[in-house]
Image (cartoon, grey):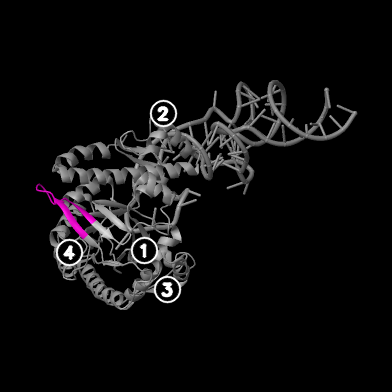
Amino acid sequence: MAALQFELAVESQEGASRAGTITTDHGVIQTPIFMPVGTIGTVKAVTQQQLKQDINAKIILGNTYHLYLRPGTEVLEAAGGLHKFMGWDRPILTDSGGYQVFSLASNRKIKPEGVVFQSHIDGSKHLFSPENVMDIQRSIGADIIMAFDECPPIPSTYEYVRKSMDLTHTWLDRCFNRLAETPDLYGHTQNLFPIVQGGLYKDLRKASCEYIASKNAVGNAIGGLSVGETEEEMYEFTALCCENLPKKNPRYLMGVGTPWNILEAIDLGVDMFDCVMPTRNGRNGMVFTSQGVINIKNKKWYKDFTPIDPGIPNEMSQYYTKGYLRHLFAADEILGMQLASIQNLSFYLWLVEQARIHIIAGDYKAWKTAMIPQISKRL
RNA sequence: GAGGGCGUAGCUCAGUAGGUUAGAGCGACAGUUUGUGGCACUGUAGGCCGUGGGUUCGAGACCCAUCGUUCUCC
């Protein structure tokens, strides 16, 4: 089987946006793309069938930290990897768990060899190192796997971010080495993406991009953003990273974001996105539509019998009404969370597909400029 | 008919020996959520304390009457 390939179909003449095709052993992904987050072997509240048929998801995420704790690598290996375990035959990307170790686990201790932390589930102690995180990701078997990094909070001091970035770079070399000396377990190629860090310091960001670029990976990720900075800062540093990362490889902006964040970042040259927002916020009643943002719990929707989103082709968004969805949330019914998640993911996937169409058509900037006020409007 | 209990926020109830602006939970209304600990978090509104008298400097608390409700007995 073959390593990931990226083919650039169209590069915009008016900005940095581009349309491409990623080929993996589990299928083809047209970019720009949004990847639904399925942390622990499930995109919460959504079935794999719905992901394919209703949402049109081409690739989903898993998380090394969560899958390592539950169900554990023994079960995953016995099942033949995550694809078989969860019944998903399209591409999967796993985050390394670096972010969770820093955001979730307690009593973590960062050492050169790795991070000692306590499980958020039972308090048990574990060590994550670049080596065993690669081993765990071998057991999971995702098509794209992420380097083990440290994601420092914003704000952090220059000195802290510089040291953290150096550690992330050292760890990256160890990730590549470990991957080179271990075989894939399930017969398909796993592709390692390094992650740019450097916080909100331009010289560090640039240095990190140059270091990452020198590794010649098949794809590169921008980390350490969407962790508390302003939107302007996020765009500024995304632009800086895109300018300093190779054109010929896909660029993945981790953890971003709102629909309008994604349209702006595409214009800056980003190809891949993931975010918990459509699912987590959906479960809490925030509904993203092609007409604007809805808080479906609000009283104003209780007799609104228009479709959830008349503007996207997803059948479920036409079949169910806003008034019904509000009722489901008011009654705390499980179907409410399911429908909101499906609507939000369908909308996100529809949005990036439209973005691709307009990049190819050559009018992306005009389309984006008209689209952002519409989709960010509070209804 | 006789005796007892209970009437405080939309609902279920707290309100300590009578002492500033009467509280909680749920519900309602609204806001937050960016490489996910699923049903979370934050805030706001809402009370002539059943009604009418009385005692007192001061009553949601005490007294009388009355209305409603509920239980027991005949």
Instruction: Please determine if labels 3 and 1 lie on a single subunit.
Output: yes
| Upstream in sequence: badge 3 or badge 2 | 3
Marks 4 & 2, CB-CB < 8 Å contact: no
Q: Mark 3 belongs to which subunit?
A: A
Which chain letter matches label 4?
A
Residue A55 point in image, percent of width and height: 36, 46
Count of numbered circles on the image:
4
C-alpha distance separating marks 4 and 1: 22 Å
Which label sits on residue A126?
A: 3
Earlier along the polypeptide chain: callout 2 or callout 1?
1
Q: Nearer the viewer, mark 3 or mark 2?
A: 2
Image vertical order of residue A283 relative to residue A214, above or below: above
First of labels 4, 1 by sequence position: 1
Which residue is label 2 attached to? A305
The residue that mark 1 highlights is A100
State the extent of the magenta-drawn residues as a range. Answer: A6-21
